Amino acid sequence: QVQLVESGGGLVQPGGSLRLSCAASRSIFGFNVMGWHRQAPGKVRELVAEITSGGTTRYPGSVKGRFTISRDNAKNTVYLQMNSLKPEDTAVYYCHAYDSPNHYWGQGTQVTVSS
C-alpha cells in the first residue's frame, strides 16, 4: 500500500507564500500522474495542480501563474509552491497519485490565508 504524507501547510497572510511537500512511501517513477487537490468547507474537492510522469503540468485558471507543481524523483517527493496567496485559497490540500488503476490520497494539510 502506498502512503503519501503531506507537510508544509499553515497560516499565512494574503500575498504570502507556502511550499507544500508530498513524500511517497515508494518510488514515484511508476505514477502516471501526481497532483494536489483542495477542499474548502462546504465545497467539493477540486484539482489545484498535476504533473505527469513526463513532466507535463496542468493548472486550473484560479491558480495558474501563482502555483507551481514540481517533482523530485530522487526524493520521491512532489512539491506545490504557492505564491500570492488569497483568502479563497484557504482549504485542506491533499496529495494525490494515480497508478492505473489505483488512486492514492494523503491525509491532507491545512492551508489558511488570513490577516
Image (tube, grey):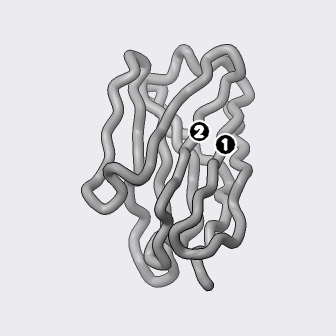
Of 69 and 47, nearer the camera is 69
Of 78 and 85, nearer the camera is 85
Q: Residue at x 65, y 17 (%)?
A: 27
Give the answer, above or below, for where 64 lies relative to 29. Answer: below
Element type where label 1 sits in the image? strand
Of 45 and 13, nearer the camera is 13
Residue beneath disc 2: 79
Question: What residue occupies the far front of the structure in this picture?
Answer: 15
Task: Please say whether residue 42 is visible from this viewpoint.
Answer: yes
Give the answer, above or below, for where 44 lies relative to 1. Answer: below
Residue 30 is situated, as x and y percent measured from the top left of the image, at 53, 16
Q: Residue at x 74, y 28 (%)?
A: 25
Give the answer, above or below, for where 40 lies relative to 68. Answer: below
* Label pair 1/2, CB-CB below 8 angstroms: yes
Residue type, mark 2 in image: Tyr
Give the answer, above or below, for where 100 lies relative to 90. Answer: above
Answer left or right for 36 relative to 1. left
Residue 50 is situated, as x and y percent measured from the top left of the image, at 41, 39
Q: Residue at x 57, y 46 (%)?
A: 95
Looking at the rendered image, the quarter that the C terminus falls into is: bottom right
Give residue 87's mark.
none
Residue 77 is situated, as x and y percent measured from the top left of the image, at 65, 30
Residue beneath disc 1: 21
